[in-house]
Image (cartoon, grey):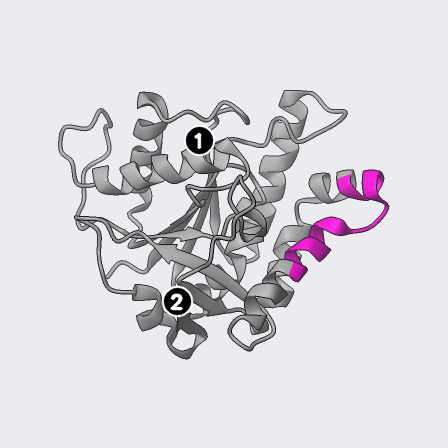
């Protein structure tokens, strides 16, 4: 198996919020880490231009990935305009074919923001399309379909406030320090919240939610996942095989 993992989300900082601890555990097992976003976070500011904040946020994302010796990629679509269409599917498929991951993490298809939901759908199709010869991408097709996992939705709930419970938990108690450092790389977002809320809510919210998931498996901190198990996708829980007793199934 190619020991490469790709975490592809809508915006810079999404992966850090939802799966950085698990990425750190995979790094310790010798996996090559790739982190990607559909958009550069060009709407995540109250003061800068789109070009200015995009540069800032891509730099922050690169710095975060580097803490795991990883590589950051941006597909250069726009915040709030991430559509499930030909362009986004081809771009995501091309990225997967270049990186050739065996394991992919992406956003929940039920979440508070449509950008996240669309990204989950786009990545689902891109994973399936990795081996389809006649896709409109220049990169060479490969098999098998990567293992695909969806992370928690923000605050673990759907748009109607109903809980979305994970089926798989990863104990990240020993990885909280690096997860916090990676999220703290996104200073533009952290400082914006500090300005408006007067507290470091960005980091605290992440730690509170990770502690909530940890409590559900009697540990300090955890990240939650659901595996895509549709026809044509790998059916065994590869995370359990790689990470052993760090993984709990409900």
Quarter of the view holding residue 213: bottom right
Q: Residue at x 55, y 77 (%)?
A: 218
**Which percent across, then down, holds residue 121?**
36, 37
Q: Is 135 left, or right, of 123 in this rendering? A: left
Point 46% across, 26% down: residue:
82
- Per the rendering, the mark at residue 75 is 1
The residue labelled by disc 2 is 30
Q: Residues within 10 Å of mark 2 (few under 14, many from 20)?
A: few
Considering the whole magenta stretch, tell me its main secondary structure: helix
Membership of 38 in magenta stretch: no
* Secondary element at image label 1: loop
Position in image of residue 36 (x %, y %)? 46, 41
In magenta stretch: residue 200: yes
Residue at 56 percent of width and 76 percent of height? 219
Q: Which residue is situated farthest in the left direction here?
A: 133
Q: Nearer the viewer, residue 207 or 133?
A: 207
> Residue at point 56% right, 52% down?
16
Q: Is residue 172 above or below residue 49?
A: below
Looking at the image, residue 139 sits to the left or right of residue 196; the answer is left
**Residue bounds of the magenta highlight:** 193-208
Residue 98 horizontal/vertical position (percent): 30, 40
Residue 191 locus on image (x, y percent)? 77, 42
The N terminus - image quarter: bottom left
In what quadrant of the picture does the C terminus appear? bottom left
Dot 2 or dot 1, earlier in sequence: 2
Q: Residues within 10 Å of mark 1 (few under 14, many from 20)?
A: some
Q: Nearer the viewer, residue 147 or 158?
A: 158
Q: Is residue 16 above or below residue 248?
A: above
């Amino acid at each position: 198996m190619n020991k490469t993992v790709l975490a592809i989300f809508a915006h810079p900082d999404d992966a850090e919020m939802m799966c950085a601890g698990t990425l750190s555990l995979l790094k310790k097992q010798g996996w090559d880490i790739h982190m990607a976003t559909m958009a550069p976070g060009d709407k995540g500011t109250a003061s800068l231009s789109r070009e200015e904040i995009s540069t800032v946020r891509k730099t922050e994302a690169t710095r975060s990935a580097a803490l795991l010796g990883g590589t950051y990629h941006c597909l250069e679509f726009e915040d709030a305009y991430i559509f499930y269409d030909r362009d986004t599917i081809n771009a995501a498929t091309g990225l997967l074919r270049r990186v050739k991951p065996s394991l992919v993490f992406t956003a929940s298809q039920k979440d508070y923001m449509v950008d996240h939901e669309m990204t989950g759908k786009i990545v689902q199709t891109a994973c399936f399309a990795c081996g389809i010869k006649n896709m409109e991408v220049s990169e060479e097709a490969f098999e098998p379909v990567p293992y695909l996992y969806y992370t928690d939705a923000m605050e673990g709930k759907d748009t109607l406030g109903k809980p979305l419970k994970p089926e798989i938990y990863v104990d990240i108690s020993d990885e909280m320090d690096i997860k916090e450092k990676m999220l703290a790389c996104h200073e533009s977002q952290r400082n914006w919240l500090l300005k408006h809320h007067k507290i470091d809510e960005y980091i605290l919210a992440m730690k509170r939610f990770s502690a909530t998931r940890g409590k559900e498996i009697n540990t300090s901190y955890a990240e939650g996942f659901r595996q895509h198990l549709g026809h044509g996708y790998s059916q065994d829980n590869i995370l359990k095989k790689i990470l052993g007793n760090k993984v709990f199934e409900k």
